Image: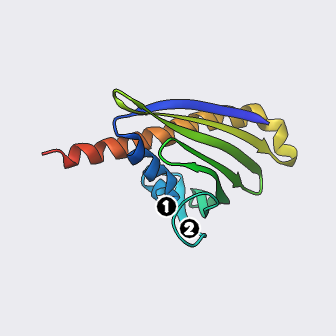
């Protein structure tokens, strides 16, 4: 098992950041590696909501199923993600700060089979990827805010 964690400040209120992240269908807008996302569950997004997503590049893709294991709007969102090669469990927190929202992430990554030997590399790449994904979210939300200002 490996841990990946980090944080970022986004100049938007916690409820705005939470709502954007909680609807996984938004992720292709800020994560260029996320090719598609569909909601599998009926009803409103909340505890137990499931999504199917496809990530990667056009020539090599990975399918995953994401399920929300905690949904505490607007302060905490936890999930379990299952792929053929790895399972990921973790959470995001959304704390108000004077600049907007301090969003923190913490993931437990469990590679399967022979991939366990590559855990240090997976952690290194995972940290870089998470920083890039959440920087993309920051750009998206902060650009939306600036485009709505008078």
Q: Quadrant of the N terminus?
A: top right
Near-viewer residue (67 or 37):
67
**Residue under the image location 66 percent in, 42 percent down:** 90
Is 135 drawn above or below residue 53 in the view shown? above
Near-viewer residue (34 or 74):
74
Comes first in the chain, label 2 or label 1: 1
Q: Is residue 136 left or right of residue 40?
A: left
Quarter of the image for residue 109 reads: top right
Quarter of the image for residue 49 reads: bottom right
**Residue under the image location 57 percent in, 30 percent down:** 6
Q: Position of residue 66 (x, y in %)?
A: 64, 57
Q: Position of residue 30 (x, y in %)?
A: 44, 49
Near-viewer residue (26 or 54):
26
Q: Quadrant of the C terminus?
A: top left
Is 26 drawn above or below residue 141 in the view shown? below
Helix, strand or loop at mark 1? helix
Q: Position of residue 67 (x, y in %)?
A: 65, 57
Helix, strand or loop at mark 2? strand
Residue at mark 1: 25
Q: Is residue 19 left or right of residue 140?
A: right
Residue 31 seen anywhere in this rendered image of the structure: no
Residue 93 seen anywhere in this rendered image of the structure: yes
Count of marks overlaid on the render: 2
Q: Residues within 10 Å of mark 2 (few under 14, many from 20)?
A: some
Is 66 drawn above or below residue 40 in the view shown? above
**Residue under the image location 68 percent in, 53 percent down:** 81
């Amino acid at each position: 098992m490996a841990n990946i964690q980090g944080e970022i400040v986004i100049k938007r209120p916690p409820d705005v950041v939470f709502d954007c992240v909680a609807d996984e269908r938004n992720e292709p807008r800020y994560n260029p590696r996320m090719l598609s996302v569909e909601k599998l569950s009926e009803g409103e997004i909340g505890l137990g909501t499931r999504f199917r997503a496809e990530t990667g590049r056009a020539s090599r893709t990975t399918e995953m199923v994401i399920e929300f294991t905690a949904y505490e709007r607007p302060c905490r969102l936890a999930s379990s993600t299952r792929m053929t090669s790895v399972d990921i469990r973790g959470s995001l927190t959304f704390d108000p700060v004077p600049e907007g929202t301090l969003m923190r992430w913490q993931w437990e990554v469990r590679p399967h089979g022979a991939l366990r030997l590559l855990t240090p590399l997976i952690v290194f790449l995972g940290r870089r990827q998470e920083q890039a994904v959440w920087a993309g979210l920051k750009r998206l939300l902060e650009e939306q805010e600036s485009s709505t200002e008078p």
